[in-house]
Amino acid sequence: MTTVLIVDDHALQRLGFRMLLDADPGTEVVGEAANGAEAVRQAAELRPDVVLMDIRMPGVDGIEATRRIMASGGRSRVLVVTTFDLDEYAYGALRAGASGFLLKDALPGELTAGIRAVAEGDAVAAPALTRRLLDTFVRQGPQPGDRAGGADSDPRLAGLSEREGEVLLAMAQGLTNSEIAAQLVLAESTVKTHVSKVLARIGARDRVHAVIIAYEAGLVGTR
């Protein structure tokens, strides 16, 4: 059973999410929050598997709430659900630690599948969406707090084998596991093993976080 905290400043939206998730035998709604500050407090108290997070809310917004929840070191993962397509809001939430995002017009099955994926440690971001995320990163350039010095000097990548570096580079280019397998002439199951090892070695929460680290480290050029 996947436990979920719903965060949205619109009561009708929270009700809609609750009705949908209550109808799914695999999920249990353990709480609701109408703003970011309340979300941070309830996430600490209820320790849900997934926080379903709106972005634009009065007071503490979803990006700052995500940052605080992830900084707390708790078990909860954040899935952003927004009316906005990939823009500075959704991108900011991913940088703050969200494991992905969906649009509010997603189909019910997409939402529940996304919640399960995030709870299991996956990232909810299709390859095409990952490519657009990277385009956004390239346009914005280095952010405050990013490391300088390039991939050779970044300690996060120092423990990667040559093959693991190739897999991370392919991930940063937005390739799926099957595309990586074809490019590197490997079995897809082998690629999955490499991906898991890469995430562990560089300290990435999930695939999206690994891609951001690759760009921050200079593994992929931003020109």
Image (cartoon, rainbow, N blue to C red):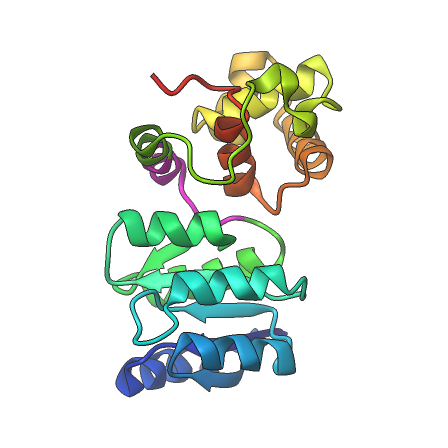
Q: Is residue 18 at all visible to an observer of this figure?
A: yes
Left or right, 20 with respect to 57, comes to right
Where does the N terminus fall, quadrant-wise? bottom right
Q: Main secondary structure of the magenta part?
A: helix
> Does residue 75 lie above or below 98 as drawn?
below
Q: What residue is rendered at 55% in x and 31% in y? A: 147
Q: What residue is rendered at 46% in x and 58% in y? A: 114
Left or right, 138 with respect to 32, comes to left
Q: Quadrant of residue 199?
A: top right
Q: Is residue 129 magenta?
A: yes
Residue 3 x/y as whole percent: 59, 76
Task: Return the residue nearer the eye: 49 or 181.
Answer: 49
Task: Return the residue nearer the eye: 138 or 52.
Answer: 138
> Does residue 207 lie above or below 1 as drawn?
above
Q: What residue is rendered at 44% in x and 50% in y? A: 94
Q: Quadrant of residue 8?
A: bottom left
**Magenta residues, as a range?**
123-133
> Does residue 149 lie above or below 7 as drawn?
above
Query: Number of callouts in the render?
Result: 0
Q: Quadrant of residue 210?
A: top right
Task: Return the residue nearer the eye: 155 or 29.
Answer: 155
Residue 11 x/y as whole percent: 30, 87
Where does the C terminus fall, quadrant-wise? top left
Residue 200 x/y as whole percent: 72, 38
Q: What residue is rendered at 63% in x and 56% in y? A: 120
Q: Is residue 124 at all visible to an observer of this figure?
A: no
Residue 122 x/y as whole percent: 57, 49
Left or right, 175 with respect to 89, comes to right
> Does residue 44 lie above or below 205 as drawn?
below
